[in-house]
Image: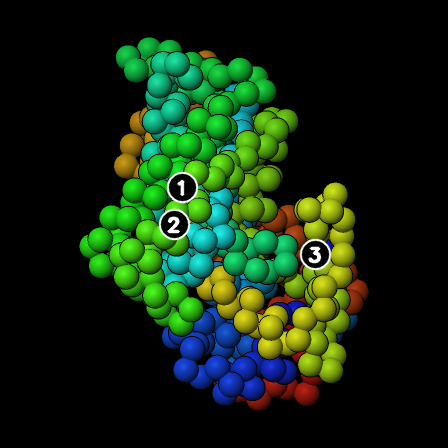
Amino acid sequence: MDRPKLEVADIFRRYGEAYRQQHDGSLSTAQRRVMTAIEVCRTAALGGHLERCDCCNYERPCYSSCRDRHCPKCQSLARAAWVEKRTSEVLQTHYFHVVFSVPEQIASITYQNKEVVYDILFRATSETLSTIAADPKHLGAEIGFFAVLHSWGQNLLFHPHLHCVVPGGGISPDGTQWISCRPRFFLPVRVLSRLFRRLFLKYLQEAFDSGKLRFFSSLTSLQDPQAFSRHLDPVRNLKWVVYAKPPFAGPQQVVDYVGRYTHRVAISNHRIVDIEDGHVKFNWRDYRDNNQQKTMTLSAEEFIRRFLLHVLPSGFHRIRYYGFLGNRHRKEKLEQCRQLLGMAPPSESSSVTATPEDYRDRYERLTGHSLRECPICHRGRMITIQVLPEGCSSPAIKDTS
């Protein structure tokens, strides 16, 4: 894919300072940190090195990345490394993709209490899947899965939901057999939806009763227990959205698909169409209109506001593992699953090296794309000739990083 001409960083560099001044009292420390990281990513502010082609003598500065998980430019290597680790864990069975969403009334509470309510979302989702799968009326097995938190829709509005990737079966209670679900049916979504709703509201009420929830601005009235209860009344009998997508075509598709999903940010640079006169245009898909691709125009201020809606709490884990994929017993449980499925043990990774690997070598090994090939002559290799310290002024060379 060609390098995008416009980036989220360009928007922040042009309009970020004005946004900070206008919203000084409402920006969190995490949001400020993300803005700064994206603004300075791959610029002279972070330092780097100067490279020269050993064939045509073309030179370029290569500046360091911010490595912030919200930065659209910093996910390729992290995504590839994650996929490499997960590839050996894929089982020879069909896989399902299940999505858990919360109603709009819950989303507003979530935004003001991200860490608490995101944890509730993970807990309610994992207990729902594990409980229904363990029920002999449905599957009667211990399943394993991982869940990825996304908080955005295509229009960048706040829409918290979990994407769960689940093998189509599990370990029998006595551990002696692999119990498969039907090829195109995992678990009944209506049953999942009802239990998910009950568990989520139960844990949300417990968080409120223990004083863990905080309310500001338009939600200040919810500090009153009766007002909080009335706010939730409309969702107690709603059908909460639990959506089971069609099963994956095969194990390799699982690896490729989840690799794109796990390290996705709110918007990729490739979706940005134009930045002009204080406005931003970007492409989006309208799922309510037959998945049509459209172009949306927002003021730069509104674009930045929507982007910052999705900044995660510091240290928050947005990918979590459960059941036989849980971190504590993953190795032993996966070996048991392979034996029950008649799979050969995974081969030892040849990529483990005794010495630390240069990031460019690691990137090429994981992605198949070389960062060392000269972009001009395509024959030479780019060789580092000078270290550029942080905050240095750029050499008289156009920044092509």
Asked whether 264 or 209 is in front, the reply is 209
Q: Quadrant of the C terminus?
A: bottom right
What is the CA distance from the residue labelled 1 to the residue labelled 2? Answer: 7 Å
- Report the residue at 57% width, 60% height from top: 157
Disc 1 secondary structure class: loop
Looking at the rendered image, the disc whose residue lies closer to the viewer, 3 or 1, is 1
Q: Is residue 228 left or right of residue 206?
A: right
Asked whether 282 or 13 is in front, the reply is 282
Indicate which disc, 2 or 3, sits on the residue closer to the N terminus.
2
| Residue corresponding to mark 1 | 236
Mark 3 residue type: Trp
- Report the residue at 48% width, 28% height from top: 190
Question: Residue 372 at x, y = what percent?
Answer: 64, 61
| Residue corresponding to mark 3 | 284
Q: Are marks 1 and 2 in contact (CB under 8 Å)?
A: yes
- Badge 3, how many Cα within 10 Å: few under 14, some, many 20+? some
Q: Is residue 199 visible?
A: yes
Q: How many marks?
A: 3
> Residue 210 falls in which quadrant of the image?
bottom left
Q: Is residue 207 above or below residue 146?
A: below
Question: Residue 398 at x, y = what percent?
Answer: 71, 81
Q: Is residue 73 above or below residue 153?
A: below
Q: Is residue 164 above or below residue 267?
A: above
Disc 2 secondary structure class: helix
| Residue corresponding to mark 2 | 232
Q: Which label belongs to residue 224?
A: none
What is the CA distance from the residue labelled 2 to the residue labelled 3? Answer: 31 Å
Question: Residue 62 at x, y = what percent?
Answer: 60, 73
Q: Is residue 315 above or below residue 22?
A: above
